[in-house]
Amino acid sequence: MGRPRPQCGRCLVEAPPLDRTVTALDYRFPWDGLLQHFKYHQALELRESLLERLNSALSAAEVATPDWLLPVPLSPARLRERGYNQSHELAKSLARRRGLRCEPELLLRVRHNERQAGLKLEARAANVRGVFAIDPLRAARLRGSSVALLDDVMTSGSTLYEIARVLLQAGVMSVQAWVVARTPEPGDE
């Protein structure tokens, strides 16, 4: 029997499709500015500092080792705009550190959607519905496996929940989310 895992009130009412979510930081000063700089300005020099915090949080949480570590994919348009996928940069470094398989091509973003950052919390789930898929030529590799999704920031969880649903429908047995920073719930101090 493992340690009980804390859950928020919303998760108790409607359980997310994730087995577990581990976050390293609150998305607050100074981390919010550093993560934005990393995400939008290709500040790769911040990658190791961010990864050190996430890796420490994963060790403290005694996470189960997944079969796959998959970064949240970007649409081709967003990738051209940013010049790189920040989640992929984090995932490939963390995979090397932890000896994990990381194949970002397994997960696809099949439709360009509006940025989540500009949307109200209620609109985020609808914005990502139908956006993700598994590469049909590689889907069999994921069947029966365990996956950890890696993202830089989690706000409502809509993106990670949608990807988890796609993975579970494709036969993945368990999905965790590993996130550098979580936006605190309104009213949290």
Image (cartoon, grey):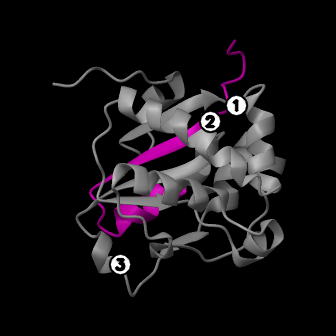
Q: Nearer the viewer, mark 2 or mark 3?
A: 2
Please state the horizontal and vertical placement of residue 87, each as a whole percent of the image.
Answer: 60, 56
Q: Which callout, 2 or 3, points at the residue further toward the start of the chain?
A: 3
- Residue drawn at (67%, 32%) of the image: 183
Q: Is residue 17 visible?
A: no
Is residue 32 rendered to the left or right of residue 102? right
- Label 1 Cα neighbours within 10 Å, binned few <14 / some 14-19 / many ≥20: many
CB atoms of marks 2 and 1 within 8 Å: yes
Q: Nearer the viewer, mark 1 or mark 3?
A: 1
Amino acid type for the residue under numbered disc 3: Ala
- Label 2 Cα neighbours within 10 Å, binned few <14 / some 14-19 / many ≥20: many
Amino acid type for the residue under numbered disc 2: Ala
* Disc 1: which residue: 27
CB atoms of marks 1 and 3 within 8 Å: no
- Residue drawn at (66%, 63%) of the image: 85
- Magenta stretch in the rendered image: 162-189
- Residue drawn at (41%, 50%) of the image: 97
* Disc 2: which residue: 181
Is 166 or 75 nearer to us in this picture?
Answer: 75
Asked if residue 97 is positioned above or below residue 140 in the image, the reply reads above
* Disc 3: which residue: 139
Is residue 94 rendered to the left or right of residue 98? right
